[in-house]
Image (tube, rainbow, N blue to C red):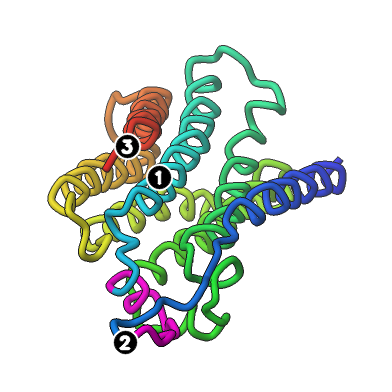
Amino acid sequence: MASLWLRGLSCMAAFVLLCVAPLGAQDHEPTPDVTGESAPHHGHDSASSSDGWEGSKEGIAYSEFNHHLAGFFVLLIGLSELVPALRISSGNWARMLLPGALILMGVFLLVWSDHQAWPVGPMTFAQTFWGDDPEILQHKLYGMLSLTVGLIEVFRRLDRVVHAGWMAPLPAFAILGGLMLFAHSHGAHPSAQKIALDHAIMGTLAISAGSTKLVSVWLDSILSWSRARGEIVWAVFILAIGLQLLLYSE
């Protein structure tokens, strides 16, 4: 059973990779300078400033699509948590929807988060993961965390890891991801203030969601607080983040 789920998730991840990688491939022609000579790109920052990607029609469409697709995955995560909390269903589809969505979102972010970054852009693997562009690094870190937590949730929900401590990575990811959003920037963007506000709202919701899930067990043990209530609140926060991502605009 476990191997079947893992093969299924691997196939879904490969499907997303094959679908989005061609879409993310951009025409990275050298940008001519004022003298008419070609000026090579040396990284995300130079590309953003020289070709006007940030705030351009193409750049906005690229960013909005990424946010909207992430919102779809986050909505799936929230739905998968709300269904059992409301005792609507206890089937395996609801249990495995969350890790599946996390894994697919992680693969997508690692592949297609930035048009200049590896593997769809001209930047090398080293320039992408060890460069000095905080936006790229954050996107890739989100992807790695999402993929890692998704795999942990697969094994936890298949009862391959049973210690209570393995429940912590999921809400911890929400809290850490929320904190990172307060420092997330899209560079020299004409809608920088609006983007910062959107990220601050999402960050607040994510921190609130993770904190609620972390303390729900503790509250259940010392107060007359039903753990199910905490799970419902957690799911509602996640759904709110997904909805905001789905409606995200620049």
How busy is the neighbourhood of tag 1: few (under 14 within 10 Å), some, or many (20 plus)?
some
Q: Which of marks 2 and 1 is nearer the N terminus?
A: 2
Q: Give the range drawn in magenta.
A: 35-49
Q: Which of marks 3 and 2 is nearer the N terminus?
A: 2
Q: Which of marks 3 and 2 is in front?
A: 2
What residue is at 26 percent from the left and 48 percent from the top? 203
Separation of residues labelled 1 and 3 (CA atoms): 11 Å
Decide: marks 1, 3 in contact (CB < 8 A)? no
- As shown in the figure, which amino acid type bears the numbered disc 2? Thr
Instruction: Choose between 16 and 76: the one closer to the eye.
Output: 16
What residue is at 37 percent from the left and 83 percent from the top? 36
Q: Which residue is the site of mark 1?
A: 61
Q: Residue 184, can we see it?
A: no
Q: Which residue is the site of mark 3?
A: 248
How busy is the neighbourhood of tag 2: few (under 14 within 10 Å), some, or many (20 plus)?
few
Q: Does dot 3 land on a helix, a strand or a loop?
A: loop
Separation of residues labelled 3 and 2 (CA atoms): 39 Å
Q: Give the percent coordinates (x, y) of residue 99.
A: 61, 43
How busy is the neighbourhood of tag 3: few (under 14 within 10 Å), some, or many (20 plus)?
some
Q: Does dot 2 land on a helix, a strand or a loop?
A: loop
Q: Which of marks 1 and 3 is in front?
A: 1
Q: Which residue is the site of mark 2?
A: 35
What residue is at 25 percent from the left and 61 percent from the top? 185
Separation of residues labelled 2 and 1 (CA atoms): 30 Å
* Vertical arrangement, residue 66 with respect to residue 120, above or below: above
> Which quadrant of the figure has residue 49?
bottom left
Q: Residue 204, can we see it?
A: yes
Q: Give the percent coordinates (x, y) of residue 152.
A: 62, 54
The reply, left or right, for residue 40 in relation to residue 196 is right
